[in-house]
Image (cartoon, rainbow, N blue to C red):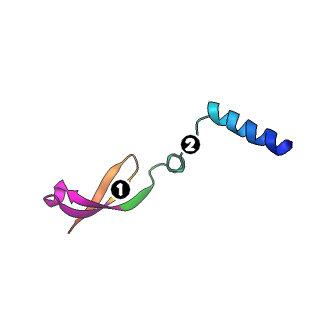
Amino acid sequence: MYRLMEKVGGRLLGMFVPEVEAAAASANACRWKYFSSCWQCGYGACDAYCCDGAGCSTIVCY
């Protein structure tokens, strides 16, 4: 009975409280990203070091 109440309560809570993504919790998470077409590289492939909310800084063209 308790588990049923817990499950129903969790669903009900989920209807009113929005979920927060993990990426939002770690502000400005940075990582290398691969792009198949970069205007900085004459539309060739590149890797870029990008931070969420801050754009990309270091670009390596291929």
In-front residue for pair 49/37: 37
Q: Amino acid at mark 1?
A: Cys
| Residue at horizontal 64 percent and vertical 36 percent from the top | 14
In-front residue for pair 60/21: 21
**Mark 2 and mark 1: span between their CA atoms?**
21 Å
The quadrant in which residue 46 appears is bottom left
* 19 lies left or right of 3: left
Residue 61 position, x and y percent, is 21, 66
In-front residue for pair 10/59: 10
Q: What secondary structure prevails in the magenta region?
A: strand
* 19 lies left or right of 41: right
Q: Secondary structure at mark 1?
A: strand
The magenta span reads: 33-48
The quadrant in which residue 9 appears is top right
| Residue at horizontal 17 percent and vertical 56 percent from the top | 40
| Residue at horizontal 33 percent and vertical 50 percent from the top | 55
Camera-near label (2 vs 1) is: 2
Based on the picture, tell me whether residue 47 belongs to the magenta stretch: yes
The quadrant in which residue 36 appears is bottom left
Q: Secondary structure at mark 2?
A: loop
Q: Amino acid at mark 2?
A: Val
| Residue at horizontal 86 percent and vertical 42 percent from the top | 1
Which residue lies under the disc numbered 1? 50
Which residue lies under the disc numbered 2? 20
* 25 lies left or right of 59: right
**Mark 2 or mark 1, earlier in chain:** 2
